[in-house]
Amino acid sequence: REHIQTFVNAALEAANPAKQVAKHIDEIRTIAENHQNIWVVGAGKASLEMALELHTHLGNEIKGGAVAVVPERLGQLSASRRASLPFGLYPATHPLATEKNVIAAKAIADVAQQVGKGDLLIALISGGGSAHLALPIDGLDLSAYQGVINQLMRAGATIEELNAVRKHAEQLKGGGLLRLAAPGRVHALILSDVIGDPLDVIASGPISADPTTFADALAILERHEIELPPVLAEHLNAGVRGEKPETVKPSNPLLGLASHAMLGNNILAVEAVKAAAEELGFVVAHVETGVQGEAGEVGRNLVQLIRQAEDRPAIAIFGGE
């Protein structure tokens, strides 16, 4: 039990939001040099810890901001600490978005629009960021939009298909946050919960390029025979006709305003466990970082591996989603 706890602690330490931000402070200060104002936005389950650590180091250098926060975390923060912060904290649910999330996402959008030329926007992104950035297009009711997404899920749509639709039905995804902050610079600090760390998938890519189009999104919805609210149907069709701006594409010069640092991910956590195991004298019999699929099937594979293990102090380490 002591050994197992050691491994758990090693994994958590490798993904500790505050400590990972602290490790990157010198880099952040270098980026912030020669910028007139520093703004902060955050979305995801680790956003509060990341934002508090950033404030500890930058303090009054932060002009303002908005951070979406898991309600339970927000309830643990003292009133005096919250009052001392130069950015607003907004409760937002996960994994399903509610009207609270729309309020939080709108606050984040409002901050991005205040970022001027010569300013820096620091975006704190972690797992759950996609739900926290839920800001449907103007006129699209959240419940009606969620009905579309739920239909897609029940129809067996892939995560790539879901994201293609989300990016064309919302305002902050598919490079939307980057577009709102232009001509200011955006630097993202990211804790990835996606295998392979694809920037366009983590939180649905608020500051990255999107290779999909309005036509792709409409084709996905038609293929799965999804019933659309009139507002969304008109928006997507207008996009196909070229009457709405596309999401940020790989050739868009706006991407020159964006940069990021990957603070933590699946691989770093697994490597930390491996190092802790070797230090204790364990034989590392198996390491895998790309585990995904149906949970029951993955569990059966784990059992087979355990049965094949030799009679020695060995460890098999799996990371995935």
Image (cartoon, rainbow, N blue to C red):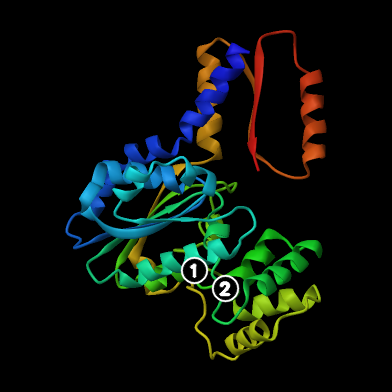
Identity of the residue drawn at 48% across and 36% down: 15
Crowdedness near tag 1: few (<14), some (14–19) or many (≥20) residues, C-alpha within 10 Å: many
Secondary structure under the numbered disc 2 in the rendered image: loop
Quarter of the image containing the C terminus?
top right
Q: Are marks 2 and 1 in contact (CB under 8 Å)?
A: no
- Residue 285 in which image quadrant: top right
- Relative horizontal placement of residue 10, taking residue 217 as reference (left or right): left
Which x, y percent locates residue 87? Answer: 33, 56
Q: 120 or 252, which is in the foreground?
A: 120
The amino acid marked with disc number 2 is Pro
- Residue 21 in which image quadrant: top left
Which x, y percent locates residue 69? Answer: 48, 51
Secondary structure under the numbered disc 1 in the rendered image: loop
Which x, y percent locates residue 199? Answer: 50, 57
Q: Is residue 47 above or below residue 275?
A: below
Quarter of the image containing the N terminus?
top right
The amino acid marked with disc number 1 is Leu
Per the model, the C-alpha gap separating discs 2 and 1 is 9 Å
Crowdedness near tag 2: few (<14), some (14–19) or many (≥20) residues, C-alpha within 10 Å: many
- Relative horizontal placement of residue 256, taking residue 126 as reference (left or right): left
Name the residue carrying label 2: 136
Q: Is residue 218 above or below residue 87?
A: below
Which x, y percent locates residue 70? Answer: 52, 49
- Relative horizontal placement of residue 280, taking residue 221 as reference (left or right): left
Identity of the residue drawn at 46% across and 69% down: 106
| Disc number placed over residue 1 in the picture, else none | none
Name the residue carrying label 1: 172
Identity of the residue drawn at 66% across and 75% down: 217
